[in-house]
């Protein structure tokens, strides 16, 4: 009986320590949520603006000659895969990797420590990834696309729906497609449309990448907050159950001692 009481006391202390850890991680995630959401909204606005510009350009007949608008029959796919820098975020990273498995032949460009570790690449932090890094990567990928080293470029990231829901998705970036829904407008491009488009595409790719990174980070923080809340509730429930078992065991031990004392005094 004494061994059971000691074991229960040890388990209670262990789970209580875990509870404090989950609360601390939940508070850290909470402190990042507002900043992450603000960055996500700004990223969305920028991506929307640059996408609108590219749509106007792709609607111009001359831009059909751009190397970025050439549709290819090959199946060589390159994916920029955005995952988190750390775990303890529910299914956030697992959902991204599950989506990537649906394209087993794709060449992977990972961003985020978990993705880099999984695909054996040099570590690139998704939380601190800068626009300069995004622009450099975009220029490199655009050059490789022009040279015909791959046929399609996609970005695998996570879409923020709400605090409770985040969905992994793939957005296809290159080649560009002619926009059919662009309203008629009079826009004058200098020196000409195709030159502007070719110069704008690296900026377009970098803008989409930064928006995906900011949105994915907001998803990671939200997923971690929810995971820590759930873990905290489970830990508290486990502590309550262990405390009840401990009290019963302790009461049983006391009752047994009293019984032994009474039995001894009657001899």
Image (cartoon, rainbow, N blue to C red):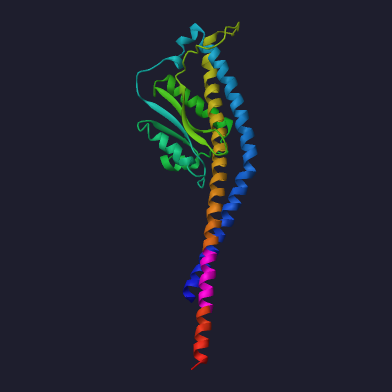
Pick whichever, 218 or 1, lies toward us: 1
- Residue 152 position, x and y percent, is 41, 23
Between 260 and 28, the one lying in front of the other is 260
Residue drawn at 45 percent across, 10 percent down = 65
* Residue 265: in magenta span: no
42 or 72, nearer to the observer: 42
Predominant SS along the magenta part: helix
Question: Quadrant of the rendered structure where residue 129 is?
Answer: top right
Q: Viewed as shown, does residue 23 lie left or right of 252?
A: right
- Up-down relation of residue 176 to residue 212 (above or below): above
Please state the total of marks drawn on the protein image. Answer: 0
Percent position of residue 35, x then y:
64, 37
Q: Residue at x 56, y 60 (%)?
A: 17
Residue 258, compared with residue 117, is above or below; it is: below
Point 60% across, 28% down: residue: 43
Q: Indicate the position of residue 148 as horizontal and vertical percent values.
A: 39, 20
Span shown in magenta: 242-254
| In the image, residue 245 lies in the stretch drawn in magenta | yes
Q: On the picture, is 199 further left or further right than 38?
A: left
């Amino acid at each position: 009986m004494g061994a059971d009481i000691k074991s229960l006391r040890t388990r209670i202390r262990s789970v209580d320590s875990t509870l404090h850890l989950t609360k601390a991680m939940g508070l850290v995630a909470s402190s990042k949520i507002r900043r992450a959401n603000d960055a996500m909204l700004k990223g969305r606005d920028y991506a929307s603006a640059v996408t609108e510009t590219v749509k106007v350009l792709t609607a111009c007949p001359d831009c059909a000659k751009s190397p970025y608008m050439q549709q290819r029959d090959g199946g060589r796919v390159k994916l920029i895969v955005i995952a988190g820098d750390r775990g303890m975020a529910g299914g956030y990273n697992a959902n991204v990797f599950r989506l990537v498995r649906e394209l087993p032949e794709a060449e992977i460009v990972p961003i985020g420590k978990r993705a880099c570790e999984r695909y054996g690449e040099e570590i690139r932090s998704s939380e601190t990834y800068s626009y300069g890094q995004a622009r450099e990567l975009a220029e490199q990928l655009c050059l490789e696309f022009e040279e015909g080293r791959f046929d399609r470029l996609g970005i695998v990231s996570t879409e923020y729906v709400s605090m409770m829901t985040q969905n992994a998705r793939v957005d296809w970036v290159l080649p560009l497609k002619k926009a059919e829904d662009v309203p008629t407008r009079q826009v004058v491009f200098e020196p000409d449309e195709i030159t502007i488009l070719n110069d704008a595409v690296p900026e377009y790719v970098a803008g989409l990448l930064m928006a995906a990174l900011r949105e994915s980070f907001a998803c990671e923080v939200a997923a971690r907050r929810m995971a820590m809340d759930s873990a905290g509730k489970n830990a508290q429930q486990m502590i309550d159950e262990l405390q009840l078992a401990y009290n019963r065991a302790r009461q049983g031990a006391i009752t047994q001692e009293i019984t032994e004392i009474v039995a001894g005094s009657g001899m």
